[in-house]
Image (cartoon, helix red, strand yellow):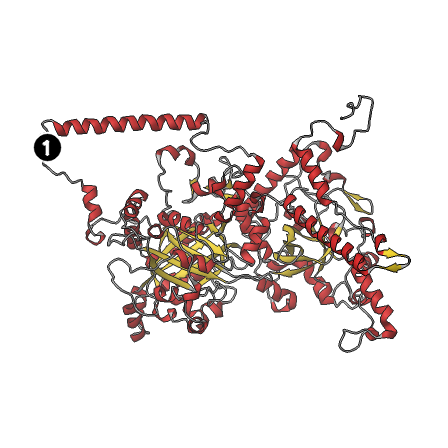
Amino acid sequence: MLPNPPSGSQKRKLPVSFQQKPDRKTLRRIDIQNARRIETQPSAGALKSGSLDLGAFIKAREFEIRALEEGMKVNKHLLRTRAFQDLPRELRRRTASHNKDRVPKRLRARVAKEMAEDNTPTVTARRRKPSGHMRLRLETAKRLEDLGKRKEKKKKDNKEGDDPMEGVTVTRKKDQLKQEDAEYIKARVPRAKKNKLQSPPVPPAKFRKRQLHKAWLPTHMFHAKRAHMTPPSASLWRFSIPLTPTQKSYRITHRASVTRGSVAWDMSYMATIGLEGPEISMINVFRWLGVGADVPDDLWGPRGHKWRRGVRSWSGWLYERGGWPANGIAPATVMWCVQDQAESDVEMKEPSSMKNSTEKKRKALIRVHPSAFLQVWEQLLHLCARPKPPVTVEDLRFEIGSIEITGPNSTEALLGILHPCAPLGEQSHISNSPEDIWSELLPGPTAATLPSNVLLGFSIADPRLRHPPRTIPISNVGSNSALLNILTTWPIDNTQRPQLLFDRKLRYLSTRSYSSQKSINRRYAACPPGQQYPTPLPHDPAIPILLLTTRPSGSAGGSGTWTLMLPWKFVLPIWQALMYYPNSCGGNPRFGGLEETRQLAFEAGVPWFPGDYPMTKAGREWRTREEENRKKEWEKRPKSKRVAYESVDLGEGRKGEIGMGWGCDWERLLRGLEHPVKNSTEEGEPAQRKQQPHHLPSALAQQYLDDPSSIADHSTLSDALVTVKLSLLTRGAPKSNARIYRLPTDDSSLRARWLALLPSNREKSSLRPPKNAMNRNHLNPNPKKQHLYHRAIASSILDGPPKPGAKEYPHVPGEVDLIGFVTTGNFNLGEGRGSGIGCIVLGRVAGVRQGEVGKGEKGIGKREESRICIVRDSGESVGRLAKWDIV
């Protein structure tokens, strides 16, 4: 009989076993407690009159071992996770926890058993109560169904009556055109809008109001359901761009781009500009834009022969005319179209004929970031009209789209969805052509394995005719020796014909033969049993594409990046096929947004345009936008949680942040004043002109640091900004807008205190065993020095390197030693420590690098010491030691 329930004055509750009516959770907790209690048998029974009974002792231990194994088995079943909790994040286990059919087949039996044991409520589609929006859709569908029934009934009644058109077959013109071959359909190609800006395609009526001041990417509907998009009132570069996936993807993106898998982006917002004209005129235009100005011998000499032929691409900076090296516009990619074989033969026969070279026309594409498109466009309009004969410019922004993909399985994914086919009007292709070599690039070499900046141009079939894609059987491909032979010889350089993507007429014909999804579905339904894909038809589109490879740059390495350029209308079909391709390593390719692009560039130690280039026009616009957003977020916080920038203690009685706390005050850095200049002028005081920073190429900056006397004009170099990579030498991770100081130049004691925090050779040697502590094989320690060996090992494991607290750090130097700001900073997953990308004033570190401050201390040379800096986050008083390198 249970005791009376405890009164209200009784503080201690009764044990769980004496509570009335325990619930399901309490019973489960009791079962867990009982399962964790392992029974034991005392050994006292095995001792009799001072002697040990061996048989009884063994039976007692046997009993305990069996009890332990039984307890482990019971606990395994009690504490196991549910099947939905064992799935990866991308399978959406939380939203599918009520439906066993949404999990992989191997787990469905386990899910059904768990749901039956836990009495999980299930909801089916036909029993679900429709919501308000769903009810409207159901009512609309019902009205359309009734309307269709009445129409069919009326049509049937007309057939039964006296129909004057009975027996007459009427064929619509649209159906008749679908049955004909696309070769015999004569259609006038619209005229090209030369030297005029392109308008975005007219969207459907129901989406037209949403695209009044911006344009959607071809994959907008795909990303809008799975990613955070730019706000409707704050689009980026007049595009609605995905920022980041809705699920947490920071570490997953890093693993997919480095270890296994792949990450893809829809980069159709990148601007493409077409040039056409005489080769000499186009070369002059490229030279005026600063193409290859950093290394003219490599690009315009014998080394750039493949680029000028059209089998390689070039990536570098474009400049205003006569503005090298200060007035940089943006990084861009330039691609030439391969000449026709007949024109190449004429050029080889008559190399000295100026008439042939002037009449010979070439085509080229320039791919540039949309933030700098208008600036490049204005420069091209001005420069292309100067040579005689002139060069025509065409805006191809909404005519050519692009997709980028990176990762170890990126090549495999592209091989699985891009199936070469013969172009329109051709029945076969030559041997060793890009179509032939493309299918032989397995087992999957990455983009970094192929020759640098390779260009591949060919035609592919519509990927919707092979949906869903199948995993490529890598075991059935040729040997590695054949692939190695292809990579070393690369016969495409000699067999590459003019890329069809440069031909505007072929782009139009392929887009015009685009089939609707309904017609594709009818062809799948008409397939006989056993046939997976529909039979190809003569009027199926041949999609011209252009593939570019980019090798990884920076210290993090990587597998390189593929860039797929194709007609705008075919971006969505290829994107859908890419997202559903099953990788051989498991899973599907992931998609990324703008934040993932910045993340991978940061991990590779490469600056991202325009965020890490505040000295350009596009970088200033991006910086202004980011500063306004940070200021609004700072003002929305409660006063108790705001960072008090005006009261930051910088040591020696200095208080207050240098410049704007939520941004980088580059104008103040270049002026070198202690107080910022007001934007508005006061009475009687003239307004001081703000000095704008300018970009400097890394090669020229490195040359100036190594030998300033080799540069004749120092006026553009002393105040120039150079992009650097920061690697922290101690703890911490820098944030964006952090301040960068050089080592103190006016206080030798403070400089010595900062240098003492470096992980010098003396501190590292104190953590190592003595030289005589181990013998030559480093396995058996010397018996006489064994205690020293154990002491050093214990110290290195338990204590680790000395970590000074916040109060033990020296105060940061003054504003006179401020050399730059951090534009992007975070913890680097690729390096396993904090790092950042920033810009520094070249003139403030050049003197220190030449040894003006003094010799290094504690074994640090003055050349190495000049690259040591101090990084302090905005709003904080503690600085961290770091090392900068030009990128």
Total marks placed: 1
Instruction: Name the quadrant of the N terminus.
Output: top right
* The quarter of the displayed image where residue 789 is located: bottom right
- Depicted 512 relative to depicted 881: above or below: above
* Residue at the extreme top: 8
- Depicted 606 relative to depicted 677: above or below: below
| Residue kind at label 1, given as amino acid type | Met
Residue 288 visible in the current orientation:
no
Q: Nearer the viewer, residue 30 or 55?
A: 55
Give coordinates of residue 8: x percent, y percent.
80, 21
Determine whether, in the image, residue 350 is placed left or right of residue 113: left
Give coordinates of residue 481: x percent, y percent.
45, 74
Residue under the point 80% across and 77% down: 775
- SS for callout 1: loop
Q: Nearer the viewer, residue 844 or 160?
A: 160
Instruction: Name the quadrant of the C terminus.
Output: bottom right
Residue under the point 10% across and 33% down: 166
* The quarter of the displayed image where residue 302 is located: bottom left
Residue indicated by mark 1: 165
Give coordinates of residue 406: x percent, y percent.
50, 57
Disc 1 residue crowd, few under 14, some 14–19, many 20+, Cα 10 Å: few
